[in-house]
Every structure is written in structure tokens, then in C-alpha cells.
Image (cartoon, coloured by chain):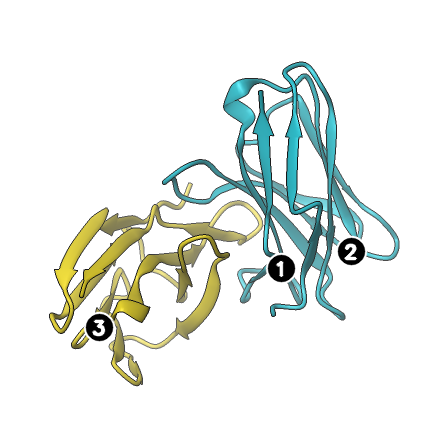
Chain colours: A yellow, B cyan
Amino acid sequence: GQQVMQIPQYQHVQEGEDFTTYCNSSTTLSNIQWYKQRPGGHPVFLIQLVKSGEVKKQKRLTFQFGEAKKNSSLHITATQTTDVGTYFCAVRGGSQGNLIFGKGTKLSVKP
Amino acid sequence: DSGVTQTPKHLITATGQRVTLRCSPRSGDLSVYWYQQSLDQGLQFLIQYYNGEERAKGNILERFSAQQFPDLHSELNLSSLELGDSALYFCASSVVGFGDTQYFGPGTRLTVL
């Protein structure tokens, strides 16, 4: 079935540094979604990318979908302590097209 | 607030017992999903229901079962509980369930002693 690899598993940064997490698939994706889970919280939808080469921005967050629609990245510029959490990508997979989540990247930010 | 509610928030029980977790989806959402998240682990998809019917199954143990009722709320039943079943159980809902955006509830933290 559909699988998606997410790297790195953990990232520790100093406040103000940039952060990037990557999601890779061996097959072409129809779309990709990104979620954020704060410590002690539940996953919250951030964004969906659909088009090849698409780039979307949300304040300090930049989301990219690869030209071949096989990979995606989430980049945070100048991290803040509020960015702490686990970031998951999710793609359509399975026999019924349900979402398959990556294992997530856990971001910690040192003030 | 996602609009998805889950009860109870916390559950502590003993090995061998049976528990039921409850989820009410967002108004208008027809699909309900159940996920298990162990400490520092990712989201393990368990099962999906759409408008009362089972649609997709993930890594759900035979000791676990779920159903979705006519009013669209869902229950996840966990039986013969083991220590390893201790985890956060999330319910999520979406409008139709074909890879559309999922809205997660706050989760139920299950502790098996």
C-alpha cells in the first residue's frame, strides 16, 4: 500500500533558526496534507497541496509540493517556541483512498 | 475547537477488561476515523466508517471493534486489554472520507494497569 517517508524524525533548533521537514513517496501523489500536533494536543490541519510545484505560505511557514508530486516540504523561518510540536504529512492511500500519515517530525525549540 | 468530541478524556483500567470510547463527529461529517498513538509514536490508523458502514481497516487488532450509529456517532470497543494497549486514541471526522481533510477530536488517554 501507499507509504510516505518523513524525515527527520526529530529536530532540535535554537529559537530563531530555520527548520525543514520532508515527506517522500515512491509513487506520484494526488495531493498532500500537513498537520501539526502540539504537545498534549491533537493533530490540526495546516494545509493541502494539490498542484505540481505548488508553493503556499502561512506567515513563517512555507509548504512546497515537488514538480513530480512525489515529495513535499514544510519550512519554518526563524522558529519560535510556539512552533514546538510534531508535524505530520498525510497522503491519500489504501484501498479506499483514506489518508496515510507519515511518522512525523518532532520539533523542539530552545529559547 | 475542531467540533469533534470524544469521551471520556481519560480512562484507567486493568488488564483483561473491556472499555468503550465514544466519538461525535463534526456536524455534517459522514466519515469517522479511529487512530491509536502510543508514546512518541505516529498515528496508527485503526478503522474508518462512512455513513454507518465500515469503509477501511488499518492495523486494528481482533480484540478491537468499532461501529458507527445512525446519528453518525461512533464507538470503539477495546476488549481483553493488555498493558501495550495504553495509548492515546483519537477520533477524526471528515465530510466524505476520500482523503479529504480530517478534523481530530481531543483524544482519549487510555491507561491499562
Residue B59 seen in this snapshot: yes
Identify the secondary structure beneath mark 3: strand
Residue with the mark numbered 2:
B51
Direction from residue B34 to residue A20 in the image, left or right: left
Residue with the mark numbered 3:
A76
Q: Which of the 4 image quarters holds residue B42? A: top left
Q: Residue B97's mark?
A: 1
> Is residue A53 placed above or below B40 in the rendered structure?
below
Identify the secondary structure beneath mark 2: loop
Q: Are marks 3 and 2 in contact (CB under 8 Å)?
A: no
Q: State the image coordinates of residue B20 (x, y, percent, origin top left).
A: 75, 35
> Is residue B44 placed above or below A17 in the rendered structure?
above
Q: Nearer the viewer, residue A92 or B12?
A: B12
Q: In which chain is the residue bearing label 1?
A: B
Direction from residue B92 to residue A90 in the image, left or right: left
The crowding category of the residue bearing disc 1, from other C-alpha atoms within 10 Å (few below 14, some 14 to 19, many at least 20), is many
- Residue sticking out furthest to the front: A111
Work out how far the residue at label 1 is from the one at label 2, CA to CA, in angstroms.
Answer: 10 Å
Which residue is at a point 60% across and 34% down the rendered structure image?
B110
